[in-house]
Image (tube, grey):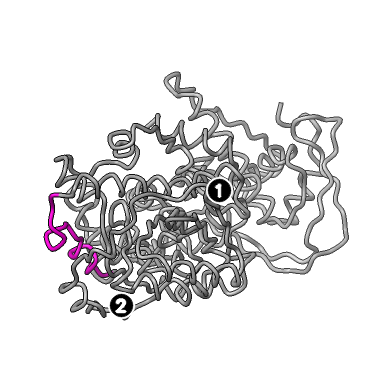
Amino acid sequence: MSQIRAKINEARLKWGIQTTRPHTSIPGFLSWRREINQAKSLPTLHPYKYTIENWHISADMVSVTDLVYPRFTRYIRTEAELADCSIDLHDNAEITVDTEMNSDSYHHVICIIQISTKTADYVIDSLKLFNKIRQYLAPSFENPEKLKIFHSSNDLLHLQRNFGIFMVAFIDTQEVFEILHGTKQIAFDKMAKSLLDKDVNKLPQLADWRLSPLPDDLLEYAAADTRLLFECWLKLKHDAVSIESEEFPVSRKNSLKLVSSYNTQTAEAAWSRYTTANTLSTTIHKKQFISLFNWRDGKGKEHDIHPNKIITPHDLESIIIHNPTTTNSLRDRIRPCRDLHNSYYLQIIDILAEYNPNPDSNRGAISMSGEQSNRKVILPSLTNGNLQVELRVNESWEPMTWESDGGLQDQLEPNSTCKTKPPPPNKSQSRYAKRHRRYRANVRARQSASHLGLETEDHKRVSLNKCVSFARQLNLTKTELLSYLNELPDNWDK
């Protein structure tokens, strides 16, 4: 696992990461993805079932004996270029096809489609041309007289889900290699090494293929991928001269696969997995799990985000086991690498509270109302007596309820001093745990500022968090908090 993570980091350092999603830059892209994600009536019968079951390879389909060099590579990003590519595909009986995808979406989104013919290599930007792919590529892909060569059948279902393209006259080089050489499910780089004695660098597969336009080295890799697949196919054809065309291994079973047979996991199926693991067992756990699972799934479909990018399965299990009742305690259950939208925290709390056996324990929310005012209040710093923190506050204010997370249980008088002994340090904690605690402290301080309607700089949030923690212990309103802090000496916390 660490080796894979190291390779991913290497690919990111080399080619970078697409920071903006295609939904924001391509008109109509998000609507198209929502239709795919929320599709409820998927086809249950293959439209080309009879054609595929009765299809055989003819001599005209395997007439190519060698590739033409020099050859040209075209990066297709406009409809006119895609139309020219469609015409060229119509004139070729054999083509090799591959795709590169991104898994951050709810369903895998195809970023580019690579196609190689006898004379040319095409790299199609299927993100930018998402609404034109079926119009120009389906006539060749669904034509039983055009042979399409893939390496593995995984791309077929993604093409079917993304663009509604059903592959006819399909050959899987993995199956052909297995029949001729006896190796099952051989990887493409190993097949190229065995047949052509060529090394293939698969590191670009880990790149973010949403980059647009593609860097030159990624573009060259994409074009070389299907070109090398064509060379492997020619070698396999040469080794299979003893096989009759009627007996040639054609991938009918994989061609007839439908997306409806591989739908997303349901909440009940996911719950069965956790029940087997004996981590969640009660009826309340099940109701909370199914509600959170369906909520997470709905958010993923709406925003076209993979559900694990919203809440990981590990975090989902941790949330249900610990049943947090405040946003701060919920954040302690979410890994810091997950960028969960702030509004989602309250929604998760509400879902858990709906099945909480003790509704009165779901406290800790801060309610306030009022309009922003230009009045400025100067608060003394709680860490440095010479530093003044300038905050803007709301003029009108309603009393709020504070919930102390493990702090003092007794309410203190305004003039009394408050000193709490910190818990003893755990010497076994790793550096990651310490960084995680610092991250959590900063997040809680930021949320305290947001709840109070205060604006302050990042390096002053820790002092502000001390203000809020002290106010929770004193059960103060906002007005009392501000007036009380103005009366405190600079070194009150020393």
Q: Residue furthest top?
A: 427
Which quarter of the picture shows residue 140? bottom left
Query: How busy is the neighbourhood of tag 1: few (under 14 within 10 Å), some, or many (20 plus)?
Result: some
Please provide percent x and percent y for residue 245: 16, 60
* Front of the two marks 1 and 2: 1
Which quarter of the picture shows residue 374? bottom right
Provide the residue span drawn in magenta: 242-258
342 and 131: which is toward the camera: 131
Regarding mark 1 in the picture, which secondary structure is present there? helix
Regarding mark 2 in the picture, which secondary structure is present there? loop
Residue carrying label 1? 219
Say left or right for 463 vs 211: right
Please provide percent x and percent y for residue 224: 47, 45
456 and 239: which is toward the camera: 239
Q: Inspect the magenta stretch and tell me whether residue 329 lies in it.
A: no
Q: Inspect the magenta stretch and tell me whether residue 244 lies in it.
A: yes
Residue 48, compared with residue 294, is above or below; it is below
Disc on the earlier residue, 1 or 2: 2
Is the C terminus in the top left, top right, bottom left or bottom right quadrant? top right
Q: Residue at x 49, y 47 (%)?
A: 69
Label 2 sits on what residue type?
A: Leu
Query: How busy is the neighbourhood of tag 2: few (under 14 within 10 Å), some, or many (20 plus)?
Result: few
Residue 476, compared with residue 431, is above or below; it is below
Residue carrying label 2? 42
